[in-house]
Image (tube, rainbow, N blue to C red):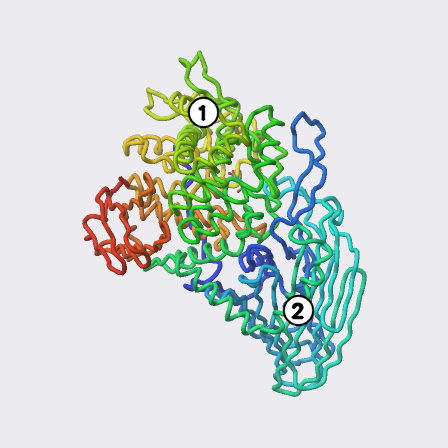
Amino acid sequence: MKMRPYEHPEALYPYHDWSLLEDSYQDENNQRSESVFALGNGYIGMRGNFEEGYHGTSGTSVTGNYLNGFYDSEPIVYPEGAYGYPLRNQAMLNVTNAQIMELIINGHTFHMNTGKVHRYKRELDMKGGILHRMVEWESPAGHLVLIRIQRMVALQHKHLAAIHYEVTALNFEGTVVITSVMDGEVIRSEATDDPRLGGGNTEPNLLIEDVQHSESLAWMKQRTRYTNFVLATAMSHTLHSLSESRVTKKLDGERISVQFALPVLQGEKVALTKYISYHTSKDYDESELMNRASDVLQMAEGKGFEELAREQQVFLEKFWRHADVEIGGDPALQQGIRFNAFQLLQSVGRDGVTNIGAKGLTGEGYEGHYFWDTEMYILPFFTYTQPEIGRALLEFRYNTLDKARERAAVMSQKGALYPWRTIDGEENSAFFPAGTAQAHINADIAYGIKQYVQATGDDEFLVTKGAEILFETSRFWADLGHFNPTRGGAFCIDAVTGPDEYTAIVNNNAYTNLMVQDQLRYSYETAGFLREQYPEHYQRLALEIGLTEEEIKGWLHAADHMFVPFDDELGIYAQDDTFLSKQKWDFDNTPADQYPLLLNFHPLVIYRHQVLKQADLVMALFLLGEQFPLEDKIRNYNYYEPLTTHDSSLSPCIHSIVSAEIGDLEGAYSYFDRTVRMDLDDINRNAKDGLHTAAMSGSWMSIVNGFGGMRLYDGMLCFSPTLPSQWQSYRFKIVNKGQLLDIFVTREGVEYTLLEGSELEIRHKGHKLTLSPQTSIKVPAEVILGRAAPQ
Ligand code: BGC
């Protein structure tokens, strides 16, 4: 039995190394394009909507403007509730739309689907961080204009976005009217039965309180219906025109517009720069919002668009110095990997109080919620390329630890249980079998902390924040599990769901038990480390949370007696206590249009079968790789891989990594291909709802951990590079304890260069290499081609 073969779809966007390009406009692809052309700075997210809107075809667009962590919270209605179900939902809000700029040429309104488009190009420049659009348009009256629009969400100014709008009159003289609008009436998407989309509700969530427009700026104050947060949206303009303009300001319900009527001569260009700012009472006192908005807009006007664009480029140069991955000989994948890194940066919260949603800031899928995706998929990319962002992601967990403690109490457990999905730390999952039951998120966070601390050497984080998370979540595990006499006294964890959401509420999910074992050992070691190295901190923390030596020893005891289900006959780990005794899914008789299964079968039908949505045990083989010999990995992989549908976008990258490790480079390549262009080629056919951030980061892992074979064993970087036959070379960089390492793999061999730092010891296929600054160590090709396992 084998899953349906995967065939790569046709390219939707042409391949360019540093940009994403579109040279024609089609209504039917628009929602997808709005996601991939989205801009963001980790706080503000703007979908790639056209400034002028969509004449008569509004159904083909989802207008989206989002602020990371800004949500409303509606009651969740359960026809049949039960104790401990989350009572309120949190949903990232689609906020006031300030992207709008309408254009009228001698009385005719510009739209992509009226008049005639002679030339069109849209380009997302990933080096400059600017979205460009060029349209040569002829109005129904024959007036020809060249429109150039540049848009940015400022990476270095959290609250700022800007649009630079230029119009050249090509064959006429007359009047160009540009109307800049801010619209507070936001229409929400409709409810569907796709669980990946979320609620949908027609009630407005933003209620208007105040609108003002002065000489210099226009602003709107709104309050969220349930959470009582205040949002202040403001805009200001700089006009670039030689002749006198007529400016009219209008307020129409929740729509503020500022209209500029500009006389033009033939061949003349006029331009308008619009600055937009968003501030909320989540960050500042309500009374400060107006002044802050005004300060940001004044600062922006002072700099001007060009200077802001220069700053944007400088910011990105720094980012790419660490984050860039080069793939020689494969332009499609080259574009994909850069696009993914760029979009991750655009969506990631960097302030320690926000995080990164499953769809980033690019759409409303999964309601802007943060999941385990952060620690298991996205954190590694940041830990090894921008460690300060990695730390901020973990600080979010520290900042929400109290809510995790409350949740554990609701679940009748000690310690802390992190929410499966959340925005501000409260559990938001209304479907507990694939929600709260996924307690493995606690161990995932612990794993993220361990990896971050070992890779960066940031003991300060561990001592002041990480340890408390580790101890409280370990306490949870010690209380949740039990020493089971029917299993010879082994430590068992019952009624949980592992990563694979096609199997729910099981006893002893192997992934969970293995990860908990690792966490309990690490927590035990961390307690020892603190006790010895930071005794004051340790005592204070122990007193604060009532931690005893006995309790700490108990963690080690539970870890040493952890039950991990194993099937002697098959020689593999069982996904859980009952998985292997179920019927296998009938893949041969499941037509392609019945995938994803979750949209076509009741959960119980799926749960009754051996069928996986995503990597589960296979993921543990990667994360805890040093525990398993290669033959075990091969045997387990060969059993689980054919049963996996990859209905979750989180799955192919993990399969790519493990395939590379077990020597199946073709498989690794094919899974990588499926991950790295997931959104650019719309492989799961839902890019319109937002991009898949975990898969994007997973594609980076597929290169670094998969083909590069990188592992962090006992705090040391180990590599075991292989090169797929389709490529000439690849190169990536790793930040390790403040040092910057460059890894370049070619047909001739692998070259390790320490670009920054004083000395770094690494392992190449088990051999120790000591790197000195600015010198390369080359390892010849015969050592890198062919089968290899990291050692
Ligand atoms: C996956 C989860 C994931 C969630 C958000 C689901 O489809 O099964 O593992 O956390 O999507 O990305």
Q: Secondary structure at mark 2?
A: loop
**Residue type indicated by callout 1:** Glu
Q: Quadrant of the C terminus?
A: top left
Residue 551 visible here: yes
| Vertical relation: 729 (above or below) 438 | below
Residue count near mark 2 (Cα–Cα under 10 Å), binned few <14, some 14–19, many ≥20: many
Residue 642 visible here: no
| Vertical relation: 432 (above or below) 70 | above
**Residue type indicated by callout 2:** His
Q: Secondary structure at mark 1?
A: helix
Q: Horizontal and vertical percent for residue 222?
A: 75, 55
Residue positioned most to the front = 536
Q: Horizontal and vertical percent for residue 586?
A: 46, 30
Q: Nearer the viewer, mark 1 or mark 2?
A: 1
Quarter holding residue 256? bottom right
Write the residue at 47% across / 48% down.
390
Q: Which residue is mark 1?
A: 549
Q: Horizontal and vertical percent for residue 318?
A: 43, 62
| Mark 1 residue's CB less than 8 Å from ligand 1 | no
Residue 447 left/right relative to 236: left
Could you tell me how far apart the alpha carbons at marks 1 and 2 are, in whole angstroms?
A: 70 Å
Quarter holding residue 577? top left
Q: Quadrant of the N terminus?
A: top left
Residue 734 left/right relative to 392: left
1 or 2: tag closer to the N-terminus: 2
Q: Which residue is mark 2?
A: 111
Q: How many marks?
A: 2
Q: Which mark is residue 746?
A: none
Of 678 and 71, nearer the camera is 71
| Vertical relation: 151 (above or below) 588 | below
Q: Horizontal and vertical percent for residue 231?
A: 70, 55
Write the residue at 62% across / 48% down.
69
